[in-house]
Structure formats: structure tokens, C-alpha cells
Amino acid sequence: FGMAGKVSAKADVYSYGILLLEMFTGRKPTDEQFDGDFSLRQWVAEAFPVAISDVIDSHLLNESNTTPTERSATLNELLVMIIQIGLSCSRVSPNERVDMKEVVVGLRRIRQKTRMIEG
């Protein structure tokens, strides 16, 4: 919506992606560190996937009931899956953004994996 001034499903997808990135990083797109060409999305994309724990809100990591070894094997995998959805939704070009049907499939996979972990 922002650049073209038109409401569309692809604009909603973008907003959803940014919302996911905000929720899991604890940062807002309007934070002082994001100015000019450097954005929340770019910050997360630069860390993805290898340094994902560097951008994830530390409160989310500290509240896990797993050891660091278990966390790297389970929580990290889930976080990568979630952030991948956020990045796919928030691509600059609307034509490159995923469809919400694909997002739902991804979220269901994450839910299923979470249930398997919780056992």
C-alpha cells in the first residue's frame, strides 16, 4: 500500500511478514537503528539463517525450558521456519511475495513440528 497507494492482498501479505518479524525480533520498523535504506527486514535477512539467534528477541530464547544444545536443535529450527515466512512475505516486489495459502501451509508445518517436540 505504502508506495503504490493501493490496497491489495499482496500488501496484506507484506504487512503480515513485517508483523512476524516484529514479534520475533522485538523490534519495530520505526526503531532508530532502521533509517534510510537499512530496514527491519534487511537486518533480519542479513542474519538469516546462520545468525538468527542474534536478531531474535532474547526474551523468547530465555523462556525456553530446554538446554542450549536442545534449543539449537529444536527452537532454532522453528525460529528459522517462522522467520523464513516473515522474509518471504515481506519481499520488496509484490510479485515475489508468497501467497497466503503458502503461509498457512508453513504455519501448519511449524505447529505440527511443535506438537511433535512437545510430545
Image (spheres, rainbow, N blue to C red):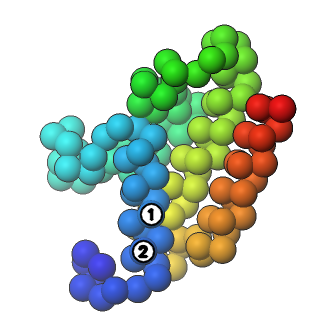
Disc on res. 72: none
Which residue is label 1 attached to? 16
Q: What is the crowding at mark 1: few (fewer than 14 residues within 10 Å), some, or many (at least 20)?
A: some
Q: Is residue 56 left or right of residue 1?
A: right
Compared with residue 118, is residue 82 higher up or lower down, i.e. above or below?
below
Q: Say if residue 93 shows up in the picture.
A: no
- In this view, the residue in front, 22 or 80, is 22
Compared with residue 116, is residue 22 higher up or lower down, i.e. above or below?
below
Compared with residue 58, is residue 95 higher up or lower down, i.e. above or below?
below
Element marked by disc 2: helix
Q: Residue 90, how many percent across, how many down?
A: 45, 62
Toward which corner of the image does residue 66 lie, by quadrant?
A: top right
| Quadrant of the drawing holding the N terminus | bottom left
Q: Say if residue 69 shows up in the picture.
A: yes
Image marks 1 and 2: residues in contact by CB distance under 8 Å: yes
For the residues labelled 1 and 2, the Cα–Cα distance comes to 6 Å
Q: Is residue 59 left or right of residue 108?
A: left
Dot 2 amino acid type: Asp
Element marked by disc 1: helix
Dot 1 amino acid type: Tyr
Toward which corner of the image does residue 18 lie, by quadrant?
A: bottom left
Counting every numbered tag in the picture gives 2
Residue reaching furthest front? 119
Which residue is label 2 attached to? 12
Q: Is residue 82 left or right of residue 56?
A: right
- In this view, the residue in front, 119 or 66, is 119
Q: Residue 87, how many percent across, how many down?
A: 50, 55
Q: Residue 110, how many percent across, how many down?
A: 70, 48
> What residue sits 65% from the left and 30% below the top?
75
